[in-house]
Image (cartoon, helix red, strand yellow):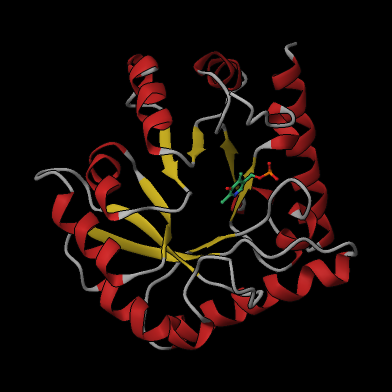
Amino acid sequence: MSDIAQHLDEVRQRIAQAAAAASRDPASIALLAVSKTFPADDVRAAFDAGQRAFGENYVQEAVAKIAALAEWRGEIEWHFIGPLQSNKTKLVAEQFDWVHSVDRLKIAERLSDQRPQGARALNVCLQVNVSGEESKSGVEPAEAAALAHRIAALPGLRLRGLMAIPEPAATLDAQRAPHARLRALMETLRADGLELDTLSMGMSADLEAAVLEGATMVRIGTAIFGARDYSH
Ligand SMILES: *Cc1c(COP(=O)(O)O)cnc(C)c1O
């Protein structure tokens, strides 16, 4: 078994254990393998181990990888999860199945306009700043409802839910708090009539906290592919 296959197994077990602790069906938690900075061959290894959904942060790198793995275009689901600038929306609208990092109307409108005719609506999550840090991207929770309703009305998009990247915390309880805030916000939006089914939260270090608080999609990089090297 490759290292990546073994790591995937371990992550699936972590999800199953956290789901059991939360009395949840493990099948209700999708695993997104975050392959940013790793080569197409590592995506192949994960694919061979049964993984089908992959997350990428950098448009150029992702587009090259999608091209390298073109033979699996119909089987792999590509998720864009990184900060998105206006001048990169077209490639993302054309090549991805999901975008998790929408936090401005202008970006959402461009993605909707640039989604190719005949393609299925692009699945999007609204990224919310649940930790209140100045530097982090994401809409402020107080502004999320208004923005969510505007995005849900765009024809090229299908608003699926909310995404967050909480600031790192050392204890399980401290990790749970921001995830609980995201879940509460999603419940408010659903009560308000939006049909949302996705809570994209949980990374290598806080997967358990996210699953305990209702994550339906966890985004795992390091625990599958190893530590990232940004030096080249
Ligand atoms: C890199 C990244 C991840 C994966 O983080 P790990 O800690 O390596 O699991 C998840 N979500 C987003 C938005 C990321 O940028």
Extreme residue toward the right, this view: 171
Q: Position of residue 12 (x, y in %)?
A: 73, 38
175 versus 39 height, above or below: below
Q: Considering depth in this image, is 162 or 17 the residue closer to the camera?
A: 162
Q: Considering depth in this image, is 7 or 83 the residue closer to the camera?
A: 83
Specify the quadrant of the image occupied by residue 91: top left
Drawn side of residue 140 relative to residue 65, left or right: right
Q: Where's the C terminus, which quadrant?
A: top right
9 versus 138 height, above or below: above
Drawn side of residue 72 relative to residue 169, left or right: left
Drawn side of residue 200 relative to residue 15, left or right: left
Specify the quadrant of the image occupied by residue 113: bottom left
Q: Where is residue 126 in the image (x, y as percent from the top left)?
A: 43, 67
Specify the quadrant of the image occupied by residue 165: bottom right
Residue at (23% x, 53% y) in the render: 121
Residue at (16% x, 63% y) in the render: 155
Q: Where's the N terminus, which quadrant?
A: top right
